[in-house]
Image: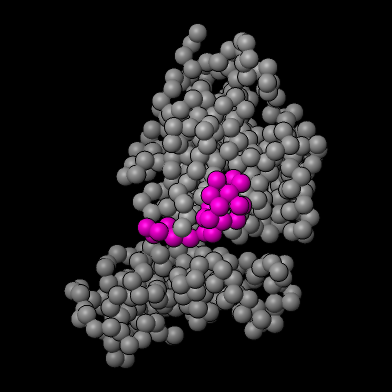
Amino acid sequence: MAKGKRRATGSGWRQVAPLIPLALFASAFTVSATDDPAIATASLENGLSGGSPVVVPKQPVREPANVPVPGVVGHGVDPGEQPTQVVSGLSRNGIPNAALKAYSRAQQVLAQADPSCHLPWTLVAAIGRVESNHGRFGGNALNAQGVAIPGIFGPRLDGSSGMARISDTDAGSFDGDGAFDRAVGPMQFIPGTWRAMGVDGDGDGVRNPQDIDDAAMSTGVYLCSGKTDLADASDLNAAVLRYNHSQQYVDLVTSIAKAYAGGSWIAVGNGTAGDDVDEAGDQIGDSTIDAPSDKDLPQAIDIPTPTATPTPTQTDGRGGTRETTRPTAEPTATPSSRPTATPTSKPSPSKPTTARPTVPTTTTTTPGVTSLTTAVGVIVGTVGSTLQELQKATTYCQTEMAKVTITKPTQEQLQKCVTAYQTGGAKAVDQVIRGLLSALGLLGILGGGILGS
């Protein structure tokens, strides 16, 4: 027998779950979308089984699917492994049969549930690669039904060692921890997020985050939630950034997705990483292969190149610049009293008296404070924050404001939002945006539907 191939003998996989052509699988489910979060939640609770619809909420799922873990981009990537190494090794690493089938199904079903989303299976696969190496992190393997055995669990989110702090949301039913949450399954969903929007991706009547079929379909629903078009670079960046709030994570996921779309993948057995593999082309016309062949897979969709929302030229005390795609509104005017040049040596250790100016006219900032020049003016980070953190906060605020029609915030509004994000996270941003909407008289019109109750 060729290496890596599984034959339908004894209690083989085909006797338990015969391979369903993807087109038939997709047509077996009704699909719809709704503006009513209550209806969406109720439909998602029912899963796919019994003809229940896959519902894509018209408002984006705000809670992250997973949170960044200090020291790693994702559990599927070895600490210290460079992005170029990950991408160049994709063909050698391979995609397990069960995972490949689940990613393919996600594209097929979401193409009906939300055609305007343009979800590619390669993007779901890229997230699976980064989050858990396609269900193989920690010595796990996907069984014939696509369930990770013995089970994939992220670190305890108790706030220690730079970790996020998320108190228990599932009474330990998904992660076995009754005090704090842990991300679970091949796509590493936080239990609270999974409970809110996880779906039954294989129609077995159970929503199991350890099941790659359920997890991959839920990832598709998550990415497509809201008026998302993944064929648009900015939408793609925002959707993946919602999934896991790390730009480094977004960059690696999109790079992997592009490589998969270009054919840099092979199908392998469902065992742990390092098992025997088969070239994808060997599957075509071979009845002993349980995974989709090249001809069975949906057509790969091109992954656009995302560009960051803020497009500034900025300078901080540590040097380094980022060029804009359009000229900034703030010229480098000669200041009335302070020098314009970035300090070339470390300033005196004395604490600044004002951490952030409200209407700055120069990119020079006080010691220990990073600044970012945007189209609306200079945005200043909290003391000790890095340039990357400030850019991330600015991107997030601009994205969230745009969702409530504040497409041209003032410098003061954007600064308040960025400060809130850096000190209190997404929930603090929601409060700031609510305040802005209230001040603009739009809360009753937009706030309830966009920000929730």
- Is 53 above or below relative to 282? below
Identified at 60% across, 20% down, the residue is 290
Q: Position of residue 133 (x, y in %)?
A: 46, 36
Identified at 40% across, 64% down, the residue is 389
Judge whether residue 348 is colored magenta: no
Identified at 66% across, 68% down, the residue is 451
Instruction: Judge from the rendering whether residue 88 lies leftward or rightward of residue 290; answer left or right.
Output: left
Identified at 48% across, 60% down, the residue is 165
Residue 404, image quadrant: bottom right
- Is 4 above or below relative to 145? above
- Type of secondary structure dominating the magenta stretch: loop
Instruction: Judge from the rendering whether residue 387 lies leftward or rightward of residue 197; answer left or right.
Output: left
Query: Seen from this angle, which residue lies furthest front?
Result: 178
Residue 103, image quadrant: top right
Judge whether residue 177 is colored magenta: yes
Q: Nearer the viewer, residue 402 or 431?
A: 431
Q: Position of residue 176 (x, y in %)?
A: 55, 46
Q: Position of residue 111 (x, y in %)?
A: 69, 41
Q: Nearer the viewer, residue 51 or 157?
A: 157
Q: Nearer the viewer, residue 267 or 340?
A: 267
Instruction: Judge from the rendering whether residue 130 lies leftward or rightward of residue 443; answer left or right.
Output: left
Magenta span of residues: 159-181
Q: Position of residue 226 (x, y in %)?
A: 67, 57
- Asked whether residue 231 is in view, the answer is no
